[in-house]
Amino acid sequence: MLHLENMVLCRESQVSTLQSLFGERHHFSFPSIFIYGHTASGKTYVTQTLLRSLELPHVFVNCVECFTLRLLLEQILNKLNHLSSSEGECSTHITCEIFNDFVRLFKQITEAENLKDQTVYIVLDKAEYLRDMEANLLPGFLRLQELTDRNVTVIFLSEIVWEKFRPNTGCFEPFVLYFPDYSIGNLQKILSHDHPPEYSADFYAAYINILLGVFYTVCRDLKELRHLAVLNFPKYCEPVVKGEANERDTRKLWRNIEPHLKKAMQTVYLREISSSQWEKLQKDDTDPGQLKGLSAYTHVELPYYSKFILIAAYLASYNPARTDKRFFLKHHGKIKKTNFLKKHEKITSLVTLQLLTLVGHDDQLDEPKYKCTVSLDFIRAIARTVNFDIIKYLYDFL
Amino acid sequence: MSSRKSKSSNLIQADYVSQVQRILRERFCHQSPHGNLFGVQVQYKHLIELLKRTAIHGESNSVLIIGPRGSGKTMLINHALKELMEVEGVSENILQVHLNGLLQINDKIALKEITRQLNLENVVGDKVFGSFAENLSFLLEALKKGDRTSSCPVIFILDEFDLFAHHKNQTLLYNLLDISQSAQTPVVIIGLTCRLDILELLEKRVKSRFSHRQIHLMNSFSFPQYLKIFKEQLSLPSIFPEKIFAEKWNENVQSLSEDRSVKEVLQKHFNVSKNLRSLHMLLILLLHFWFCLGNMLALNRVTPSHPFITAADLMEANQLCSMDSKGNIVHGLSVLEICLIIAMKHLNDIYEEEPFNFQMVYNEFQKFVQRKAHSVYNFEKPVVMKAFEHLQQLELIRPMERTSVNAQREYQLMKLLLDNTQIMNALQKYPNCPTDVRQWATSSLSWL
């Protein structure tokens, strides 16, 4: 069991609760267990690691992957069949479309020798998607032990609290277990765990400290923090690699990395640019102020007439149709008549920039309908550049 | 010498403990038909009489067992069936069909299941029937014994009866109840449901064929009886092999049930929910705390840290049982997300629960950051938007209507699904909450 402690950090009490719930192999466990907690709080990892290291027969299914009833039931049955059959045997694929057949086939499969006297565990990850599937699925799984009359326990893993799952007429209440979020100390410990071997643990721990200082107030998700740590570490080591500072020069290292991390928050964290773009940027060592993000905010320079088309599209999209008369009767076409061909080109280019989107059916070739998808701030900036007071023409600002 | 003796006694102890665990876990986790019936003797008598009338005297009947979740309906019927099967001459003669509303979601599947459970698949073969009624009557004809005058009585048990009432035309229910009224085969239809208004769900023609017999299980025991149940559930049965240990254990349970703090905890639990399932949940947690305060990962075999259950174990179990789950989720949010929740709280206070959108929350947040905050950096709007979307993903806020094409994301109206007490409680427990954030939470006007 000691190696389990090393594999699963900062989760001792949850592991012990789960172990005592599982009990001994042939004991009956509680029919259903519901584990909830924030994303990246270790639910999936701890459950899987525990089941594997205790070598309990289990089936692990992700409800996002198996988004229909048939996929879900078939995957469970086939994985179980795989578990129960001896090695080398190639079993046929089982098909199952309804829950009734599932129960019947489940009873058959668990009659196998090596599954007979022990608790079989079915783990359903991202269980919140079960609520959107057939209505009998969730109550059925909660009672699977009773319905199949076998020693089986279903474990639900989810981010959403149990109260939002409960069906209207009630159901068999599962055992609810909470996986607490990691405290900042725990995060530090876990993140420092994967330090690259070339540098000392203290050096990496100092880096993690700086990273958490910048990002902790915004994000406590372990996966995101780990990703950011890995992406930005090369930049942190740069002064040491170049020879400008040694490992202990904390102030110099801090001054080097801090603006970089702030820029990361506006770009990589928001997925404005991809991680590979970020890494390339670090290598090229350009000024981080020139980043071209996904949002067309700073760097799109539109031609004059395109701007007016965009403004017109915005007004058309967000003003209710009946107010057009009110705004535009006295408006004598500030927009000069342009060549119709050019108008079509300009509209297509706006669609490519994703400032307009096609709405409605694709088959209406001669009368396509568009909608403006920019935000208010952006359109105000554009309108300002052409001296058009857009606020006067917006219904919501009257 | 003494250390060896204590080691061996520890091993013996561990062995007893494993047996105790096994018995108690079976009692709490697995609904075995060996347990005792608490407070439902009258209902039990009624049911068993009804069953005997069908099995032995060939009378047809129908009955509904109604009771809230966890009140013991399934347990009651299982007990009754067990007793019935022990009566002489009954078990060879009688057939049982168990249907469940969760499994048989339409009448076609239900009919196939009935065919399967009556072992008549070969008899039916590939026949095609004109109607449901024909099919069912064919099945029941096939059950007639040699001299074609009498047929085996059949017990139909329909679990989640209210779900059958949602099938198209309620065909299955109509036909089953029709058979119970006509003189074909002796059947008894037993429906189990948690809905008190089940009769409103039935169509007129179905309702008229129903005998209107209802057995109610209402968890009608008082607190002293609840205490007795608690004691009985924890006590070891007399067939336990180690008599001395069992006696000591039962004495400990007795003293526990007389302890004042234990009584308080049980009273609180009883006030919230009377049913035995929630009691079982508490007892499982109790077993867990008794079992592993401490030595869990250390040894290969799990051993308890103290030989008998104490009141402190029950306190801890109760605390775990009565956690506020949304409060736990709020505990894990980042500081920025907490600030957004506080901003929403203030908007709710000012505008009396009117829905808000992201822009309003952002403005409120800006007011705080520009005026008073030293510990919260003025984040860019997209970063705040990401935090807002995370709250939506956790279902702590919800859009008022489905995402409409017309509104932009920042202007979509939302509702907060936490109330003020929950927020304030969660903030109390929030780790390392910056002081200015905490002060802002208590009053939005503290800048005055």
Image: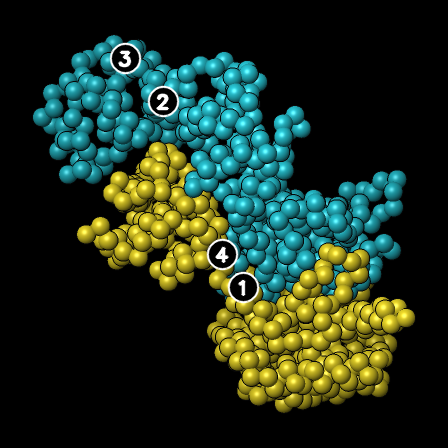
Chain colours: A cyan, B yellow
- State the separation of the CA atoms marked 2 and 3: 15 Å
Residue under numbered circle 1: B166
Of callouts 4 and 1, which one flags the residue occurring earlier in the amino acid sequence?
A: 1
Which dot, 3 or 4, sits closer to the camera? Answer: 4
Residue under numbered circle 4: B328
Q: Residues within 10 Å of mark 4 (few under 14, many from 20)?
A: many
- State the separation of the CA atoms marked 4 and 2: 39 Å
Instruction: Give the vertical position of B216 relative to A307 (above or below).
Output: below
Which dot, 2 or 1, sits closer to the camera? Answer: 2
- State the separation of the CA atoms marked 4 and 1: 38 Å
Residue under numbered circle 2: A296
> Dot 3: what SS?
loop
Residue visible at 60% across and 37% down? A192
Q: Do the numbered discs 4 and 2 sit on residues whose CB atoms are within 8 Å?
A: no
Residue under numbered circle 3: A303
Instruction: Give the vertical position of B342 relative to B275 (above or below).
Output: above
